[in-house]
Image: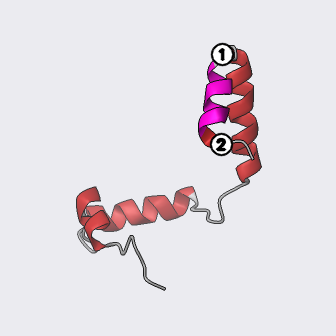
């Protein structure tokens, strides 16, 4: 099997257009995310933050509260 580093080396030898096509194809192969948030939901959440009914947290606070290394 070819390694990621070998793929990267091959990609560096490609033209910008070829690399763009490769990247586009790889992204398409990932498929669509399994979540969807409507514009209405985003607006509702912003309104909740603005009116104080929900407290906003920083990115650092979010990351510190996540269990990034679960031991399942």
In the image, residue 27 sits, relative to residue 43, either above or below, namely above
**Dot 1 crowding, Cα within 10 Å, few <14, some 14–19, many 20+:** few
Q: Secondary structure at mark 2?
A: loop
Q: Kindly identify which numbered label has been placed on residue 44.
A: none
Q: Main secondary structure of the magenta part?
A: helix
Camera-side residue: 19 or 58?
A: 19
Q: Quadrant of residue 7?
A: top right
Q: Position of residue 6 (x, y in %)?
A: 65, 34
Q: Is residue 11 magenta?
A: yes
Q: Secondary structure at mark 1?
A: helix
What range of the chain is rendered magenta? 5-12
> On the rendered structure, is 66 left or right of 70?
left
Which callout, 2 or 1, points at the residue further toward the start of the chain?
2
Its colouring scheme is: secondary structure
Q: Residue at x 62, y 26 (%)?
A: 9
| Residue under label 2 | 3
């Amino acid at each position: 099997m070819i390694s990621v580093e070998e793929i990267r080396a091959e990609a560096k030898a490609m033209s910008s257009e070829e690399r763009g096509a490769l990247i586009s194809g790889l992204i398409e192969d990932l498929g669509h995310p399994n979540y969807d948030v409507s514009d209405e939901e985003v607006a509702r959440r912003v309104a909740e933050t603005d009116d104080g009914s929900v407290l906003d947290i920083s990115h650092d606070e979010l990351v510190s509260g996540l269990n990034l290394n679960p031991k399942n």
